[in-house]
Image (cartoon, rainbow, N blue to C red):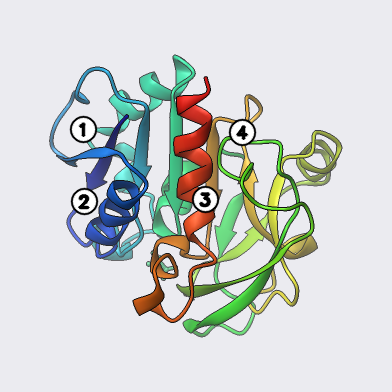
Amino acid sequence: MRAAVLVFPGSNCDRDLAVAFRNAGFDVEMVWHKDTDLPGGLDIVGVPGGFSYGDYLRCGAIAAQSPISGALKAHAARGGYVFGVCNGFQILTETRLLPGALLQNAGVKYICKTVTLRVETTDSAFTNAYTAGAEIDIPIAHHEGNYQADAETLARLRGEDRVAFRYLDAPNGSTDRIAGILSENRRVLGMMPHPERRAEPAHGGTDGAALFTSLSEALVNA
Ligand SMILES: NC(=O)CC[C@H](N)C(=O)O
């Protein structure tokens, strides 16, 4: 199994994401934002958290126009898996690989703490190792995590079972307490919380690990 992790100037969770993929059995290659191609034979592209291009304009807005972005979109268009965490989720909405937008937190403050999420669907390669309705503790660290979308988009996300995770209590003001969503083909997941920061005992908890083992099991059984 092969994963690539994109690296932008200002990414700071790229290595953590690579470690989580490796611990789940993936070979991982880091890909610089100035590259225009992804390595061949990839199963998944990870878009990591951080402060790409210093969060200028809007978080993720410049990364969405970077040289590697065309290859990322082509990979998704071929039905490839993509996983965006935090700034990665922001980049996926800016590239329109996922609908909606991430606005400033309702309290207009950066929030850094561990929150409880509910696993809303197990019908995805990212969540099949969880139990539906499971409550998991995962850290957040962001200032633009307030998920918003128009009524039609929200109705589709709900109706198509594409809300992957909800906050029990949305500290950032997200509509419908949405913490993570899936694309129409269920192969692109974006989420604000950081499962890669809660994936081994030294992190203080392992609730995020099942996301990576879900993926490796889904790929092995594909
Ligand atoms: N941890 C992150 O990826 C942070 C994302 C973004 N820089 C924000 O603060 O909203």
Residue receiving disc 2: 8
| Residue at image coords 44%, 35% | 82
Residue 67's label in the rendered image is: 1
Q: For mark 2, does the 10 Å Cα neighbourhood hold few (<14), some (14 to 19), or many (20 or more) residues?
A: many
Secondary structure beneath dot 1 equals: loop
Residue placed under numbered mark 4 in the picture: 183
Left or right: residue 105 versus residue 177 is left
Position of 77 with respect to 160 (left or right) is: left
- Marks 3 and 4, how far apart at CA: 16 Å
On-image quarter of the N terminus:
top left
Answer whether labels 2 and 4 touch (C-beta < 8 Å).
Answer: no
Say which mark, if any, is on residue 211. 3
Quick one: label 4, few (<14), some, or many (20+) residues within 10 Å? some
| Label 4, ligand 1: CB separation under 8 Å | no
- Looking at the image, tell me whether mark 3 or mark 2 is earlier in sequence order: 2
Whichever of labels 3 and 4 marks the residue nearer the N terminus, that label is 4
Q: Secondary structure at mark 2?
A: loop
Foreground disc of the pair 4, 1:
4
User: Alpha-carbon distance for marks 4 and 1?
Assistant: 23 Å
**Residue type, label 1:** Pro
Q: Nearer the viewer, mark 2 or mark 4?
A: 4
Q: Indicate which label's residue lies in the foreground, 3 or 1.
A: 3
Q: Is residue 197 left or right of residue 176?
A: left
